[in-house]
Amino acid sequence: MKKLLIVAALLVAVTSSIAVFQTRPPTQRQLAFVDLEGNIKPIRGVPVSTFGPRISPNGKQVAYRDEGAVWIVDLASDAVPRRLTSEPGEAPIWSPDGERIAFISIYQGFEALFWRRSDGSGSAELLADRARAPESWSAVNQEFSYITLVGPSGDAGDYDIWTYSTRTKKAAPLIVIPPSAQSGSRFSPDGKWIAYESNETGRAEIYVEPLPRSGQRFRVTKNGGSRPLWSPDSSKLYFDNNSGNPTRLFSVNVRWQPAFTSTDPEPLPITGFIQPSGTYRRQFDITPDGRQFLMMFPPAAASQR
């Protein structure tokens, strides 16, 4: 009897250890809001494979890619994330009214542009083939920008910026500067300007052009910059330094009258967020009111600040 009790106790101990191991949460990243002063407000943990989070127009949800699919998570609760795509999916962006999400999936063996209702109803609809990743959606212009990978090999890194019109249902090239890469496009809130990065000089720099394009082109950075974001009133541009160690956010003030001008980039006290250098896809976003950024941090980094 004594031996049986000892064996039973050992089995309970081993079983408990296995249960603890199996329920231990996987390695996570910390999703957080960061204000302009660099104060971090952790929101919730997300899987380490989370990529390209985009906040909804009402600021209540986030769409992102994880394990080859598009997911949506609620920021105001601990609800389990909802998978939007049954097919492969990545690079989601929200429509201005929050009703649809555009993303990339596979069509006839190649990446193509799709959209689907954000509530998951209906099925995904093919918009354009041979597309790479949607980037910015303009309510004013009724179109969104995306990048496409061209070149004989299909992987030469010659990204171009195209647009898809939700009014005419047609795709068209917008900014093409071969053989360099243009990406990270962002329409200004008033729809009159587009900011983007181009590596035509040998490294990524930020440029701004008026819309419709007129041949005017303004270089905003001189020492490197990637992945621009506009403030809601179009008076500022935010971007990262693309160095990766450590990542840092910068800002420039812009003016439109009597002519376009921009100030020298100023570093913000926002560092250490996850943004691998060389990754074209922006790993952070700005809230609809422009007061905070949505960013990802390693768990330890977020808890120490």
Image (cartoon, rainbow, N blue to C red):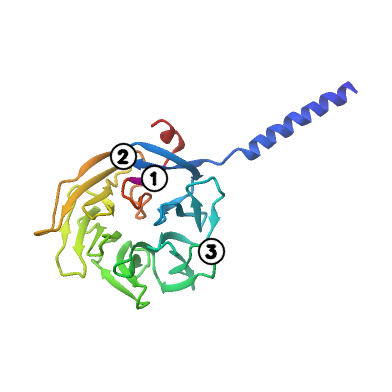
Residue that carries the numbered disc 3 in the rendered image: 120
Say what amino acid the circle numbered 1 marks.
Answer: Met
- Residue plotted at (26% across, 40% down): 268
- Residue plotted at (42% across, 73% down): 127
- Residue plotted at (38% across, 50% down): 283
The image quarter containing residue 202 is: bottom left
Mark seen at residue 270: 2
Asked if the residue at tag 1 contacts the one at tag 3, i.e. Cβ–Cβ closer than 8 Å, the answer is no
Of badges 3 and 1, nearer the viewer stands 3
Tell me which numbered mark, 3 or 1, is placed earlier along the sequence.
3
Please provide the residue range marked out in magenta: 292-296
Mark seen at residue 295: 1
Category of crowding for the residue at label 2, using alpha-carbon neighbours closer than 10 angstroms: few (below 14), some (14–19), many (at least 20): some
Residue at mark 3 to residue at mark 1: CA–CA distance? 25 Å
Asked if the residue at tag 1 contacts the one at tag 2, i.e. Cβ–Cβ closer than 8 Å, the answer is yes
Q: Can residue 143 be seen in this view?
A: yes
Residue at mark 3 to residue at mark 2: CA–CA distance? 35 Å
Category of crowding for the residue at label 3, using alpha-carbon neighbours closer than 10 angstroms: few (below 14), some (14–19), many (at least 20): some
Residue 38 percent across, percent down from the top left = 32, 37
